Amino acid sequence: MMKSFIHVEPESHFSIQNLPYGVFRPVKGGKPRIGVAIGEYILDLSVIEGAGLLKVTGLIQDGIFAQPTLNAFMALGKDVWSKVRGRIQQLLSEEEATLRDHLALRDAAILKMSDVELLLPAQIGDYTDFYASKEHATNVGTMFRGKENALMSNWTHLPVGYHGRSSSVVISGTDIHRPKGQMKPKDADAPIFGPSKQLDIELEMGWFIGPGNEQGKPIAAAHAEEQIFGLVLVNDWSARDIQAWEYQPLGPFLSKSFATSISPWVVPLEALEPFRVDGPNQDPTPLPYLHKNKASTFDIHLEVHLKGKDMEQSQKIISTNFSYLYWSMAQQISHHTVAGCNLRPGDLLASGTISGSKKEERGCLLELTWRGSEPIKLTNGEQRVWLEDEDEITMTGWCQGDGYRVGFGELTGRILPVID
Amino acid sequence: MMKSFIHVEPESHFSIQNLPYGVFRPVKGGKPRIGVAIGEYILDLSVIEGAGLLKVTGLIQDGIFAQPTLNAFMALGKDVWSKVRGRIQQLLSEEEATLRDHLALRDAAILKMSDVELLLPAQIGDYTDFYASKEHATNVGTMFRGKENALMSNWTHLPVGYHGRSSSVVISGTDIHRPKGQMKPKDADAPIFGPSKQLDIELEMGWFIGPGNEQGKPIAAAHAEEQIFGLVLVNDWSARDIQAWEYQPLGPFLSKSFATSISPWVVPLEALEPFRVDGPNQDPTPLPYLHKNKASTFDIHLEVHLKGKDMEQSQKIISTNFSYLYWSMAQQISHHTVAGCNLRPGDLLASGTISGSKKEERGCLLELTWRGSEPIKLTNGEQRVWLEDEDEITMTGWCQGDGYRVGFGELTGRILPVID
């Protein structure tokens, strides 16, 4: 097993097998730039590139890692990503002396993670959210329309999705104020205005688009994975009471667009290859443009933890897996572009809530508490149906290798009271 | 009445009372830059600014009109916009010698419109589409759910809207390929895949956002108009067969995101002030955060013309008015931000289809042909229910002053056959 000269604990998410990309700014000052995570450290790629150590690829422009976003690198495509990744892995390996034995360069290029602030990894042109979990869509449908009409008739034929809001995508650690809005209580004659009382999370994963496509030229499913630069965790905060009143007939709007949180480290698709697995069987067989390759998903263990303001420790409330999703990432990309819509470098697509068949695998509070009828019991004796002020949510996820992990780190967000 | 030393026909849309902003590139070469339209000419603001003639405002940074988008200028806010506009109006007026008598500067700064290519006026971060016409929502609802259930219960309480796709917003003159997609014929057991057979237009207007707001800090309705930089015409191309199959429960997606066309000249809100009028009465009275000022809309005459490939001349098929919209722009902005969503300079909001109470005032083919049951008769003997290949659509609109017009020019788009 490949090892780095930088110490990495076996349970660290950031092994030399991972090397996720992120944008950071040293706490002591300096411009935003690009690095990779390794153990509890960050390798500053702007320094490594500046030292001439990434020239081997012959393909990247000068200063591409000194930029404040990954967009330009994302635009270069799979071959360049693979070469750069291979070179960084080589530079960090315990057998390679170039960086290991160059103490001045190590000093300049390797920072403690605790000494930096992590920023949004890309300028997100458009953000799209899907609804790709059959268990989630079935649960929600059952609650709102009954068991017989749980899944809409289109659901098994196409990956249902909608345009989200890119301006309000925020990085892990950003506090979220409870949103206000219109809602209509069950027995009221008219809507009321006030703070949302049904604030929820949605455990999702998102992926950043690479080169993208020209308007009018769809991406074939067989080539769609080439467009995936890497993956992050996504918390699609949702105000269920606002959503219920606003969503017909044009879909969710303000109930989602107040904030969407993402994790800072973008895990390259290549790092997930050892964990590739089959997704669920698809019946009926999708139309040809949605053709699914054999093993089209990845075994990524996912967890959500909640910590109320009076709790000493956070408590795990959800435990599920990315591979449960019915529609693959490639199918979602292919569908997104089939009518001609163009994707651009840095665009973010997300899966929708990831739920499994067991109760603890349900990816949002709406499902987990079955619309409030089965409150979550917390260790300190409290209960939760929806999020309360000061609740802190932490999402995490990783692939378990033999003696190492390829993980996504943490995605945290805390609910602050409504702003008056 | 103020006049310019540049000749402007009374029926020209680009009087000195208008002075809309656009981004252009000379056909003979050069970088994109910002200008205003005047008659059949463009005043190159990068040249005027470079000559030191816009310094009077004391507020704008150097080179702001040499940029390829209006975003930086949009971010400066209402007071700066007003000062700059006043100064340009002064420079173009027939009484002012500065530019009028400086032949070398006139030569450098004034271009024929036919000598330039017009580009997208802004980098659009997010694009939002509303559904603000009561006549349109009622017509569509009647066709799909019957007269008794035409309007959803939320419609009169909030401006229904959804997130659109910003990557596929294109400038007037861009040809649009007929989209392909999934659709489900009425009596079929399963969906099919193929070219859309129900391709439609939607006559809308859009407005660009100025400074915007911080996430979590809503824009009050009383201040929302200060956020409007200016207005454009919008054609929200729609594939009705794809839409009908995909839109539940998360709203329209691929049926709209293949292309949205906008007109190139952004008419400043200030230029519309003489045409301010009352909008429709709102019953029930909206919640306080949606408070409407007395005269909250503008008398803008709007038309749509269609030209089939075998027609010698285009034919007017729609004639309506912006002031028919039920929800005001200020209400739509206020609603958009009330839960905390942030708007950024250059974001585009659009009204949704603008329909009136008369048949010729219906703003899309779906309504105009009442879902195909009342085909449009064309002058060459053909009929239209939906758009055919090679059909060219031209939208236009203007405010009629006393001896002058404040207009939007033309928004054209032609349907090309599906790409194989």
Image: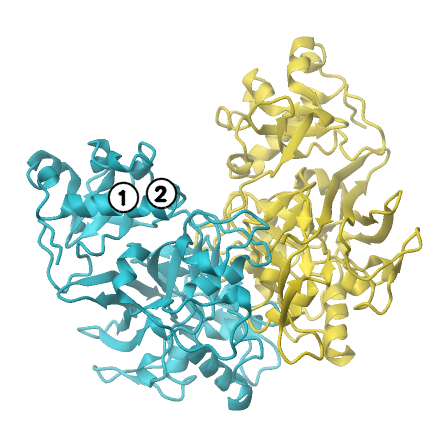
Chain colours: A cyan, B yellow
Image position, residue B184 (x, y; %): 66, 73
Q: Is residue A182 above or below residue B54?
A: below
Q: Is residue B390 above or below residue A387?
A: above
- The answer to whether marks 2 and 1 sit on the same chain is yes
Judge whether residue A336 can be spotted in this image. Answer: yes
Between discs 2 and 1, the one toward the N terminus: 2
Residue at 82 percent of width and 49 percent of height: B306
Residue at 57 percent of width and 29 percent of height: B32
Residue type of the residue flagged with mark 2: Phe
Q: Is residue A95 above or below residue A154?
A: above
Whether tag 2 and tag 1 are in contact, CB under 8 A, the answer is yes
* Residue A18 sits in quarter: bottom left
Image position, residue B285 (x, y; %): 67, 68
Of marks 2 and 1, the one in the foreground: 1
Q: Report the residue marked by disc 1.
A: A84
Q: Using the image as rendered, state which of residue B401 and residue B376 is in the foreground.
A: B376
